[in-house]
Image (cartoon, rainbow, N blue to C red):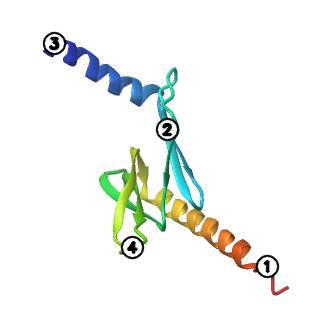
């Protein structure tokens, strides 16, 4: 049995590093994710949230670029305490996390405007 583990576990990580990707879908009420191993795709898992927050857990620096795992938090309705609802398996650079934060903010601003009947305007 131990020999079997030594043969299977390294191949699993090799396949992940060569062929796989993580799909992450964020909307105003839920996040959904699945893993695609090239020939096998896991089921889409959907997690609802009350208030979404993001963070990054830094792991390494590569040529001056900090990389880490993107962490998505739900701030609970009853006490506003954060709880981790998803952590990416793929390392993301810090600049990409900042861009994701901006896009998430735009998503919630758009929903707020539509819900409250506000129209975007220009001063031109």
Disc 1, disc 2: CB below 8 Å? no
Q: Earlier in the sequence, mark 3 or mark 4?
A: 3
Nearest to viewer (mark 2 / mark 4): 4
- Residue 36, compared with residue 121, is above or below; it is above
- Tell me if mark 1 has few (under 14), some (14-19) or many (20+) residues whose alpha carbon lies within 10 angstroms of its own: few
Q: Which residue sits furthest bottom?
A: 123
Residue that mark 1 sits on: 119
Disc 2, disc 4: CB below 8 Å? no
Residue located at (80% from left, 81% from top): 121
Residue that mark 2 sits on: 34
The answer to whether residue 27 is left or right of residue 50 is: right
Residue located at (48% from left, 66% from top): 50
| Residue 3 image-quadrant placement | top left
Question: Disc 3 and disc 2: Cα gap in Å?
Answer: 30 Å
Question: Disc 1 and disc 4: Cα gap in Å?
Answer: 32 Å
Residue that mark 4 sits on: 78
The answer to whether residue 120 is left or right of residue 8 is: right
Q: Which residue sits furthest left?
A: 2
């Amino acid at each position: 049995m131990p020999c079997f583990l030594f043969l299977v576990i390294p191949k699993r990580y090799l396949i992940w590093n060569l062929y796989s990707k993580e799909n992450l879908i964020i909307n105003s009420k839920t996040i959904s994710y699945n893993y695609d191993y090239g020939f096998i795709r896991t089921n889409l898992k959907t997690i609802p949230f009350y208030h979404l927050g993001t963070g990054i857990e830094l792991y390494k620096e590569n040529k001056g670029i900090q990389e880490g795992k993107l962490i998505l938090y739900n701030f609970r309705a009853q006490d506003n305490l954060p709880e981790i609802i998803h952590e990416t398996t793929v390392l993301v650079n810090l600049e990409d996390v900042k861009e994701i934060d901006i896009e998430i903010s735009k998503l919630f601003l758009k929903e707020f405007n539509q819900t409250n009947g506000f129209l975007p305007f220009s001063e031109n």
